[in-house]
Amino acid sequence: MTFEHWLAFAAASAVLLAIPGPTITLVVSYALGQGRRSATATVAGVALGDFTAMTASMLGLGAILAASALLFTVLKWVGAAYLVYLGIKLWRAPVGDGSGPAGTLETAGRRMFLHAYAVTALNPKSIVFFIAFLPQFLNPGAPVLAQVVIFEVTFLVLATLNAMSYALLAAAARRTIRRPGVQRAVNRVGGGFLIGAGVLTAAWRRTA
């Protein structure tokens, strides 16, 4: 693999990651509601979710999803239902000043980590996307496994930095929205986006 191959993959990945989707919506919503300390958990969940999706794609799950309409539909509806569920929870979430007990923050952090992981890993579009996207940058004349590992590590680093950037920006903006009424509006906007993402996921059809 040449440096040009790697640079092209990194540039394409950075552009694609910068476009907000359900995962970034979840990260931003939690960062606005809970702040920087809690948002870190969602970034870790995103990284592990992307790792799971990419590894599953490389192991052939992406090809199976592309070939099996039933499996694709099941996974699509599970992911869509989960997004709607999270959207409703965020819409109805209580507001406060974020000064709860440490144990509460720790528990919330674990939940947010699992939520971010599930939203990222259970997206069938991501799994199919990886198996269609990655081969475009592989050099057939070089060892494939080494290239896949390098590309996967590159994508994970970029995805983590991208999610962290969104989380930190949202956490910084949180300082200006201390009023409960504004926090409630933010929760409802974020919840609405998650519900909308769930609806779009359910309506999305795989390309045959």
Image: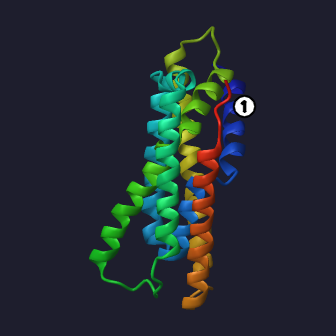
Quadrant housing the C terminus? top right
Residue 99 relative to residue 17: left or right: left
Residue under the image location 50 percent in, 20 percent down: 146
Residue 82 relative to residue 164: left or right: left
- The image shows residue 34, relative to residue 180, as above or below, that is above
Q: Looking at the image, how many numbered discs can be counted on the residues?
A: 1
Residue under the image location 50 percent in, 22 percent down: 64
Residue placed most toward the observer, 59 or 204: 204
Would residue 165 be visible to someone looking at this image?
no
Residue 104: x and y, percent? 31, 76
Q: Hey, which quadrant is residue 14 in on the image?
A: top right
Q: Hey, which quadrant is residue 157 in on the image?
A: top right
Residue placed most toward the observer, 2 or 200: 200
Residue placed most toward the observer, 195 or 154: 195
- The image shows residue 64, relative to residue 12, as above or below, that is above
Q: Secondary structure at mark 1?
A: helix
Instruction: List the residue tagged with mark 1.
Output: 8
* Colour scheme of the rendered structure: rainbow
Q: Residue furthest top?
A: 141
Residue 154: x and y, percent? 57, 37
Would residue 56 be visible to someone looking at this image?
yes
Quadrant housing the N terminus? top right
Residue 199: x and y, percent? 61, 53
Residue type at mark 1: give it. Ala
Residue placed most toward the observer, 184 or 51: 184
